[in-house]
Amino acid sequence: MPIKNVFNDEGGTGLEVGAQNAQTTQIDDFTSQTNNEKVRFNTSKDMTTGSLNVYLNGLRQRSSRISIIDDRNFEFQQAPSTGDILEAVYLTPSE
């Protein structure tokens, strides 16, 4: 059985030069919005399904702690505290 060549034309394993990346990584910082009351947060761009990772004070949150409402909104069961560092990392669909 043949083994697929995992190296690109330049000898690396990344995208080939000129290859179009179908998705890009987006990082949104919601720290200024944490206030002990707000539970729903709106991303700056549409999210690719299944790509959202939410970090609260540097710790990745389990999916049981957040709910994805739609392609731009996610919600906590309990509001982050004032001053908590909240970031969302996700992929955006290709344009």
Image: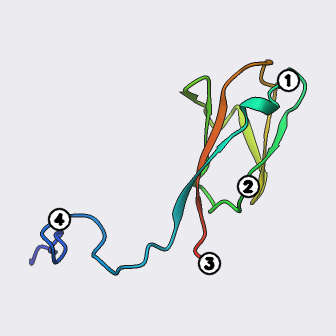
Q: Residue at x 55, y 26 (%)?
A: 58
Secondary structure beneath dot 4 equals loop
Q: Residue at x 18, y 69 (%)?
A: 6
The circle on residue 91 is: none
User: How far apart are labels 3 and 4 at the CA level?
Assistant: 26 Å
Q: Position of residue 25 (x, y in %)?
A: 53, 56
The circle on residue 12 is: 4
Query: Around disc 1, counting alpha carbons within 10 Å, would you say few (fewer than 14), some (14 to 19), or many (20 or more)?
Result: some
Secondary structure beneath dot 3 equals loop
The residue sitting at the right extreme is: 37
Q: Position of residue 2 (x, y in %)?
A: 9, 78
At label 4, the amino acid type is Gly
Instruction: Tell me which corner region of the image, top left, top right, bottom left or bottom right, holds residue 64.
Output: top right
User: How far apart are labels 3 and 1 at the CA level?
Assistant: 34 Å
Task: Specify which label sits upstream in the sequence, 4 or 2.
Answer: 4
Q: Marks 3 and 1: CB-CB under 8 Å?
A: no
Task: Specify which label sits upstream in the sequence, 4 or 1.
Answer: 4
Q: Please give left or right for residue 50 compared with residue 16 in the image.
A: right
Query: Around disc 2, counting alpha carbons within 10 Å, would you say few (fewer than 14), some (14 to 19), or many (20 or more)?
Result: few
Task: Specify which label sits upstream in the sequence, 3 or 1.
Answer: 1
Residue hosting label 1: 35
Residue hosting label 3: 95
Residue hosting label 2: 44
User: How far apart are labels 4 and 2 at the CA level?
Assistant: 33 Å
Task: Locate the N terminus by quadrant.
Answer: bottom left
Q: Marks 3 and 4: CB-CB under 8 Å?
A: no
